[in-house]
């Protein structure tokens, strides 16, 4: 293979093996998903005490529970006796305790070992030493973010900081009141592509004119391939005549109460590395959570969140949801079309980024830094 001489307009991407090599994915599980804050579940999905959900975070299964006092706790989903997986279901609800299906060791919702067969015949056992292994948890935007690291990185810097850096104002994201919104729709996409292809796709709009006709009708500046989402504080403005962020530009719902005039009629996108995208429009918030399951498979859960009264009224959300559902479908199809090519000899040295994609190089540098590798 010959290497093409560099041209300042074109910056190299990562080589193809970063998207196909199981060993690279294993290193990412270790140094990215298990090391950083990972957005696991929406708090309102665990409404009542005893509700739980299990999620895959890197190589670990994590269980998030709603406790009797109303808080959220996260634990490794592993029994301390002989290691059976405690909860096999993705979600469920128990009354007071989680019982291991193997020998019935039983834990309360705060992870304490409360009972085990014959435990009373072992008076020397200190139960408090055999509680479930706790995982750090923070709540933000109405979601539980968990971190498996022994010493989690600063949440303010690495999570909230992403929104501040993008929007240029610490208050901007908070004005949407995301934690108080109600779930209007959730769609789960099982994408046959590496998680980084999905991040890279979300970070650029060079493809918008080609594959997103509905989106570029609503946000005409996206038709230029302009990476509007990466100019600090800039939100793409709705086109003239567009009434709302809907599939046909028809009217949406009332503006969320704290969203100021300056943020009205605009779309803002924030990437919170490694696995979250937040999309802000005047009347709703769309939040994507990625669950990278293999080097070539990523589940994406996308939530459309509206003012509680909009959801309670039974209003027809279909035109509102349809716009970004189409965008998702178009984007994920593009990622799936790209994934097989990552293993081709044509992509051994990677591809190139055009100027409106150059900022993706920052994501690559960040990733290589996490993996402890020199720039490609
Ligand atoms: S492995 Fe859980 S009770 Fe034995
Ligand atoms: Fe897209």
Image (spheres, rainbow, N blue to C red):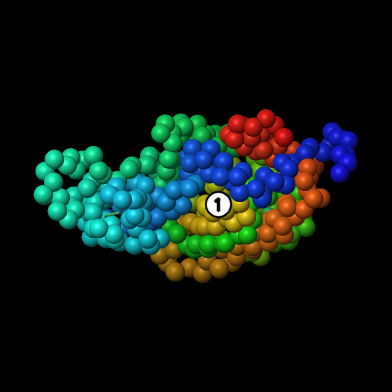
Q: Is residue 112 left or right of residue 25?
A: left
Q: Is residue 141 visible?
A: no
Q: Residue at x 61, y 51 (%)?
A: 295
Provide the secondary structure element on which disc 1 rests.
strand
Quadrant in which residue 298 is drawn: bottom right
Quadrant in which residue 24 is drawn: top right
Q: Is residue 159 left or right of residue 127?
A: right
Q: Could you say which is closer to the camera, residue 76 or residue 173?
A: 76
Where residue 354 sits: x, y (%)?
A: 80, 42
Q: Is residue 155 visible?
A: yes
Where residue 215 sits: x, y (%)?
A: 68, 58
The quarter of the image holding the C terminus is top right
Q: Is residue 279 left or right of residue 49?
A: right
Q: Residues within 10 Å of mark 1 (few under 14, many from 20)?
A: many
Q: Residue at x 72, y 47 (%)?
A: 16
Q: Is residue 314 above or below residue 227?
A: below
Mark count: 1
Q: Is residue 305 above or below residue 269?
A: below
Q: Residue at x 53, y 38 (%)?
A: 31
For ligand 1, the image quadrant comes to bottom left
The quarter of the image holding the N terminus is top right
Q: Is mark 1 within 8 Å of ligand 2?
A: no
Q: Could you say which is closer to the camera, residue 283 or residue 159?
A: 159
Where residue 234 sits: x, y (%)?
A: 65, 40
Where residue 304 sits: x, y (%)?
A: 51, 58
Residue topped by disc 1: 292
Q: Could you say which is closer to the camera, residue 317 or residue 105?
A: 105
Q: Residue at x 84, y 37 (%)?
A: 9
Q: Could you say which is closer to the camera, residue 247 or residue 96?
A: 96
């Amino acid at each position: 293979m010959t290497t093409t001489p560099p041209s300042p307009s074109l910056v190299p991407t990562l080589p193809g093996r970063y998207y196909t090599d199981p060993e690279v994915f294993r290193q990412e599980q270790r140094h990215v998903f298990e090391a950083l804050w990972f957005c696991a579940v929406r708090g309102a999905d665990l409404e009542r005490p005893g509700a739980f959900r299990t999620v895959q975070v890197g190589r670990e299964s994590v269980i998030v529970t709603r406790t009797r006092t109303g808080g959220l706790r996260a634990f490794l989903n592993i029994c301390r006796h002989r290691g059976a997986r405690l909860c096999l279901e993705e979600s469920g609800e128990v009354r007071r305790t989680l019982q291991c299906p193997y020998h019935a060791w039983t834990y309360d919702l705060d992870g304490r070992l409360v009972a085990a067969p014959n435990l009373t015949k072992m008076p020397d056992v200190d139960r408090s030493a055999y509680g479930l292994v706790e995982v750090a948890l923070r709540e933000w935007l109405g979601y539980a973010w968990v971190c498996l690291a022994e010493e989690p990185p600063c949440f303010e810097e690495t999570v909230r900081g992403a929104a501040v850096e993008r929007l240029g104002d610490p208050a901007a994201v908070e004005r949407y009141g995301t934690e108080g919104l109600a779930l209007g729709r959730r769609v789960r996409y099982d994408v046959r592509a590496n998680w980084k292809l999905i991040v890279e796709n979300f970070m650029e709009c060079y493809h918008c004119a080609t594959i997103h006709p509905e989106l570029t009708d609503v946000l005409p500046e996206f038709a230029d391939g302009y990476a509007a989402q990466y100019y600090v504080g800039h939100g793409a403005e709705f086109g003239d005549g567009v009434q709302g962020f809907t599939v046909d530009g028809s009217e949406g719902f009332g503006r969320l109460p704290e969203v100021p005039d300056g943020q009205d009629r605009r779309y803002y996108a924030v990437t919170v590395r490694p696995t979250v995208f937040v999309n802000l429009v005047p009347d709703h918030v769309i939040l994507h959570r990625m669950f990278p399951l293999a080097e070539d498979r990523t589940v994406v859960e996308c939530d459309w969140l509206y003012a509680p009264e909009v959801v309670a009224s039974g209003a027809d959300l279909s035109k509102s949801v349809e716009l970004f559902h189409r965008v998702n479908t178009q984007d994920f199809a593009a990622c799936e079309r790209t994934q097989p090519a990552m293993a081709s000899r044509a992509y051994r040295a990677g591809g190139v980024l055009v100027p409106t994609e150059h900022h993706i190089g920052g994501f690559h540098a960040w990733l290589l830094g996490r993996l402890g590798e020199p720039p490609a």
